Image: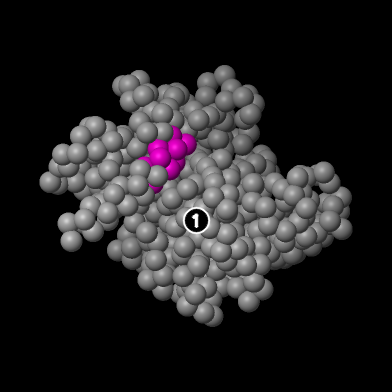
């Protein structure tokens, strides 16, 4: 994969050219060796110490780092793109065994760590395009157990404001000519979300959690379930490993509805008109035991083909769960050994960008399999890969395709390549890529020595 450089970040300004260089070096080291410690990322103690000092330095703020990363993400979405999906989700980053100042509670008083909310851009055919916007924070311990008090707070003072903020800030980063379809799971079913102060070309596709009332006084999902069947379709649902997809038949019902504004929101909000879509496996009566999606959308629905398209788009929300899997299991952000929450926050957002780049390699090979592999690999990388896989020093004159090198990298990571296996998954790719980087380092040294000998 091509080396990350300062020139890739138009908004990077950490106050010193050496800091800027260290920023890109850290990200590149994580890409080359995902899952390794800071000491293993660096060749010697001097570089390792410089990395620790970077994260500890109070003058290198999280805001400055995020400004550069967010601008980099926005640049990865071409302004010529007509429509994109913006996927939103949160994840707990656990540091239960780490003694670091500034960590907060997670799901209970025993959990300790940080919270990360990510907004990622994908194409309408499910290819990750950019890590766009992130929020990271710790919960104050004195807020634990005060859930009832939060009900009286305005939405801006609640943690759930992260959903609205993610939408608004993502819109600011993307060109206003692009249609943004914001997709989120049940936690985002907040009435205020449907009134997010946003620009034109903004749509919502949200999985519902609440049993809301209609203007007729009846309950929304009771009414939708009574509708005549609109169609039966087959979904391709990824398994728990994200590797194979399972064909699942579901029944679909949909209707435009007008939601009654909750009593607690009257005076500030009005009723709202949306389209409700129910996607349900026959016989499933528990959302935790099968597919039973209740979707609310502002998107225009002309016919069943539109509904099918929006259901497919919702399935791509799974990409952001895979991203969280990559940064935890691949980049091992929960194994960081830094002693301040602020240092951890800076490290996490930088590791996230590295993890996203690894994720892009996997999905790009599925979307554009026939392109020249030099769109993601350096010349040394694909050359040594050919040598390793063919077990010969005869290097082809032209680079192989992206699909081919991805298969080879998968084999280095343990993928057997049988027809029934499907394409290599994320974990296999990062294992293989790590081995490839080791081979490439040795290859570069041998090439340099050979050239010196010729001189």
Expressed as whole percent of the image width and height from the top left, the position of residue 369 reads 25, 41
Give me the residue at 33% from left, 21% from top: 418
Residue 237 in the image: x percent, y percent?
A: 46, 30
The secondary element bearing badge 1 is classed as loop
Whether residue 100 is in magenta: the answer is no
The residue at the point 21 percent across, 48 percent down is 372
Identify residue for label 1: 43
Q: Position of residue 241 (x, y in %)?
A: 50, 30
Query: Residue 98 versus residue 392: which sits nearer the camera?
Result: 392
**Image: magenta residue range:** 426-437
Of residues 438 and 146, the one drawn nearer to the viewer in this rendering:
438
Q: Main secondary structure of the magenta part?
A: helix
**What is the quadrant of residue 222 in the picture?**
top right
Q: How is the image coloured?
A: one colour
Question: Relative to 432, does residue 249 appear above or below in the rendering?
Answer: above
Is residue 170 visible to us here? no
Quadrant, the C terminus: bottom left
**Is residue 436 on the magenta stretch?**
yes
Q: Which quadrant of the figure has residue 424?
A: top left
């Amino acid at each position: 994969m091509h080396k990350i450089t300062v020139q890739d970040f138009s908004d990077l300004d950490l106050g010193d050219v050496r800091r800027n260089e260290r920023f890109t070096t850290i990200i590149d080291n994580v890409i080359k060796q995902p899952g390794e410690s800071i000491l293993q990322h660096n060749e010697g103690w001097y570089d390792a110490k410089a990395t620790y000092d970077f994260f500890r330095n109070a003058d290198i703020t999280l805001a400055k780092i995020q400004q550069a990363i967010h601008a980099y993400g926005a640049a990865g979405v071409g302004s010529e793109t007509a429509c994109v999906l913006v996927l939103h989700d949160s994840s707990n980053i656990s540091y239960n065994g780490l003694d670091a100042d500034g960590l907060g509670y997670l799901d209970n008083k025993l959990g300790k760590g940080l919270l990360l909310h990510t907004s990622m851009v994908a194409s309408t055919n499910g290819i990750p395009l950019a890590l766009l916007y992130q929020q990271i924070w710790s919960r104050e311990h004195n807020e634990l157990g005060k859930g009832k008090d939060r009900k009286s707070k305005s939405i801006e003072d609640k943690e759930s404001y992260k959903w609205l903020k993610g939408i608004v800030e993502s819109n600011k980063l993307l060109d206003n000519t692009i249609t943004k379809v914001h997709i989120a799971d049940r936690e985002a079913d907040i009435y205020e979300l449907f009134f997010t102060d946003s620009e034109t070309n903004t749509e919502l596709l949200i999985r519902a959690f609440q049993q809301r009332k209609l203007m007729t006084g009846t309950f929304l999902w009771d009414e939708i379930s009574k509708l005549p069947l609109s169609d039966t379709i087959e979904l391709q649902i990824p398994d728990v490993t994200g590797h194979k997809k399972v064909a699942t038949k579901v029944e679909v019902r949909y209707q435009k509805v007008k939601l009654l504004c909750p009593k607690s929101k009257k005076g500030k909000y009005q009723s709202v008109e949306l389209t409700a879509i129910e996607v349900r496996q026959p016989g499933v009566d528990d959302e935790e035991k099968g597919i039973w999606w209740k979707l609310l959308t502002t998107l225009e629905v002309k016919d069943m083909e539109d509904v099918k398209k929006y259901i497919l788009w919702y399935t791509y929300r799974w990409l952001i769960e895979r991203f969280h899997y990559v940064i935890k299991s691949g980049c091992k952000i929960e194994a960081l050994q830094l002693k301040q929450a602020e240092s951890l926050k800076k490290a996490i957002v930088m590791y996230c960008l590295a993890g996203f780049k690894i994720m892009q390699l996997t999905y790009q090979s599925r979307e554009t399999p026939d392109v020249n592999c030099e769109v993601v690999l350096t010349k040394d990388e694909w050359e040594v890969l050919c040598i390793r896989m063919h077990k010969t020093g005869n290097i082809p004159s032209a680079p192989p395709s992206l699909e081919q090198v991805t298969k080879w990298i998968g084999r280095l990571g343990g993928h057997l390549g049988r027809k029934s296996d499907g394409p290599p998954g994320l974990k296999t790719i990062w294992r293989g890529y790590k081995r490839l980087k080791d081979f490439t380092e040795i290859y570069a040294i041998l090439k340099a020595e050979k050239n010196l000998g010729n001189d």
